[in-house]
Image: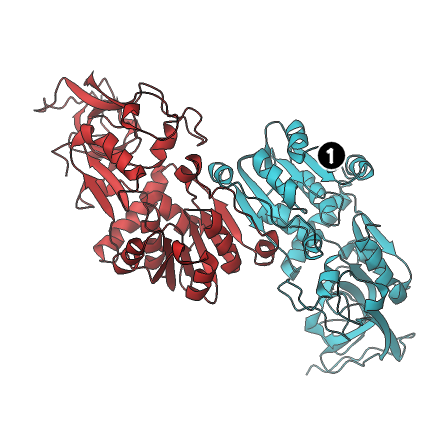
Chain colours: A red, B cyan
Amino acid sequence: MPTDRVAPEAPGIPETAREVRLAAHLDGAATAANFEIAEVPVVEPGPGEVLVRIDHVFVAAAYQDLMRPDCPLPVPPYRVGGRIGGGEVGTVVRSRSEDLAVGDLVQTMAGWGEYTTGPAASFHKLDAGLFPSSSYYLSQGPTAYYGMATLAQAGEDDVVFVSGAAGGVGSLAGQIAKCRGAARVIGSAGSKEKVAYLVDELGYDAAFDYHDGPVLDQLRELAPDGINVFFDNVGGEQFEAAVQAAALHARFALCGALSGQIGGGTGGHPRLDLMTAITRHLELRPYATYHTPEQIWAWTEHFAKWLAEGRFVFPQTVVEGGVEAAPGALLDLLAGKHRGNLAVRFSSAAQ
Amino acid sequence: MPTDRVAPEAPGIPETAREVRLAAHLDGAATAANFEIAEVPVVEPGPGEVLVRIDHVFVAAAYQDLMRPDCPLPVPPYRVGGRIGGGEVGTVVRSRSEDLAVGDLVQTMAGWGEYTTGPAASFHKLDAGLFPSSSYYLSQGPTAYYGMATLAQAGEDDVVFVSGAAGGVGSLAGQIAKCRGAARVIGSAGSKEKVAYLVDELGYDAAFDYHDGPVLDQLRELAPDGINVFFDNVGGEQFEAAVQAAALHARFALCGALSGQIGGGTGGHPRLDLMTAITRHLELRPYATYHTPEQIWAWTEHFAKWLAEGRFVFPQTVVEGGVEAAPGALLDLLAGKHRGNLAVRFSSAAQ
């Protein structure tokens, strides 16, 4: 007869903890006034439940979109008084479930709090020994992998173009293509510094600054025989140029610039040259992922392997400072102050 | 030891026969002056070859595009002095091949001539007993089937929208969706007469005239819960409306209005609302088919079954008059004088 396993009293679990809440829905861009930090009780787990200490939280530009009451994403927006976030890793510190033990590393969607309590089945157990830090589990990797590998199926002999290549998704997407054997990976970005970063640090074969001239001209120069795969983070002129530069049967993973578009960006309604798209049999796959366990695992498996082989650079910034630092980290991300992927360490005990 | 089989002298095979040639490349729309009818020798088959009498020829609007020297289709345009056409059925009348016998019905790309001679392997053998007439093998069916079944995978519970539904492709595409169990098939066309034709004769559940108001308004009224499949023959406003009316994970087969676009139509560069396409995970498949044997067979197999079950109407016009009538049939088609699919009978012996 199975009984609830109650872990021995763990030292250092407080009676109350802090969380970051949405103070008010957005009317424009996010500011510090949209966030509030609240002190709440740490809830003891009931039967079948676990208590998890949040170690690292992810920071994504899309969170700003979820702060709008009319968010067009097909997921519920944040409610006022509820937690920000939705991609965290933590450690089980109390368990009343047979499925998770104290010390287990888990993925959660519980949001930016120091602790969360819930049914064991609502957490996804992770392999704590796979990466140097649990923060490696927090990235746009599943989105980049799903688009580049599952949808666009970038592989050997492919010439790949990634727009917005220095961003959270793009900085991973190009490397994924390279690791899958792409013949040539080309990236676009918005500054000379980012262009150098792509080539010098992330292994892009070529890159260009879209301020330096028409995207199509630069793309044709760097990919004279056309592109086989386009991974789009931008839309607009980059999308229109990619259609013109596409080879027969080119595959387009259109990850889009969700935040840019919602926030008033101009990339959202490019012209689609149907004649060219038809005669070249383009395959256009606009998509947004929500990091299902399958998608996370598909990414994690390859990411760990490529890291171990020394073929992958993980462009991540981890901000210290816990709960207090999280709102500022998101505001800095939205202001363009970070490259790659961004996380905040929530617990000094985090590995 | 296999030897060449020479068929007994077939009565009625002339020493010369006629063919329709491109007299001059197009500079604008096709006119009678672009065609010439020439008398050429009927060539005796060599070893491994057969002589085929052309029974019916297909007439497609895309042929006008192939009459342009700068045709954007990824197939060679017609050369001046060469035959028009590229989709015909005929009967083997002399054979020096073990693979085809006199009397066999075959598909050919030999063009608008009364006879053609070539290697047996250049013909595709057909089942003469499958249809009431060999003309049934000539249609946009492979194009419609590939788009609706292979790419869009229309099936049960799907709400399907077909633009340009009374045309050669559209008149088949809607019926294909219906036969595959679609819950509701909606068509658009350019006149009240065509709208009535779609509903009364082709089994569409609903149809509308795009002159009667904005496409999106009419589509939303007829498909209040959104469309799951869009089969596009038009582009432009129809495409833009379909994106807005799309349900989550809707599949778009973009067959396009190739001729209209090449000929100066306005449907070729619609806006693509990337945000909507991304959040709804649309699957966009622009395509042009060239009727490979596999595509022809996939269509033919289902077409014959659905016809036998009394579930399919074949909207075809067969023009009598042979070689002399072919150029005029194409000009009439381009002038909008035909609905559905068009063929010309080339031999009075054709079944």
In which quarter of the view is residue B49 placed?
Answer: bottom right
Residue occupying image coordinates x 19% and y 26%: A114
Residue farthest to the front, as pictured: A212
In which quarter of the view is residue A47 placed?
Answer: top left
Residue occupying image coordinates x 34% and y 46%: A169
B99 up-or-down from B208: above or below: below
Residue farthest to the left, as pictured: A11
Which of B209 and A217 lies nearest the eye of the viewer? A217
B161 up-or-down from A48: above or below: below
Where residue A125 appears, as percent x and y from the top left, is: 25, 35
Residue occupying image coordinates x 49% and y 55%: A241
Classify the position of the C terminus of chain B by image quarter. Answer: bottom right
B48 up-or-down from A167: above or below: below
Residue A69 located left or right of residue B85: left
B19 up-or-down from B168: above or below: below
Which of B112 and B11 lies nearest the eye of the viewer? B112
Where residue B181 appears, as percent x and y from the top left, is: 65, 37
Which of A35 and B302 lies nearest the eye of the viewer? A35
Q: Does residue A280 appear in the picture of this structure?
A: yes
Where residue A58 appears, as percent x and y from the top left, is: 27, 36
Residue B191 located left or right of residue A78: right
Residue A351 located left or right of residue B125: left
Residue on which the image places disc 1: B208
Q: Which element carries disc 1, helix, strand or loop? A: strand
The residue under label 1 is which amino acid type?
A: Phe
Classify the position of the N terminus of chain B by image quarter. Answer: bottom right
Where residue A340 appears, as percent x and y from the top left, is: 28, 46
Q: Does residue A182 appear in the picture of this structure?
A: no
Chain letter of disc 1 in the image: B
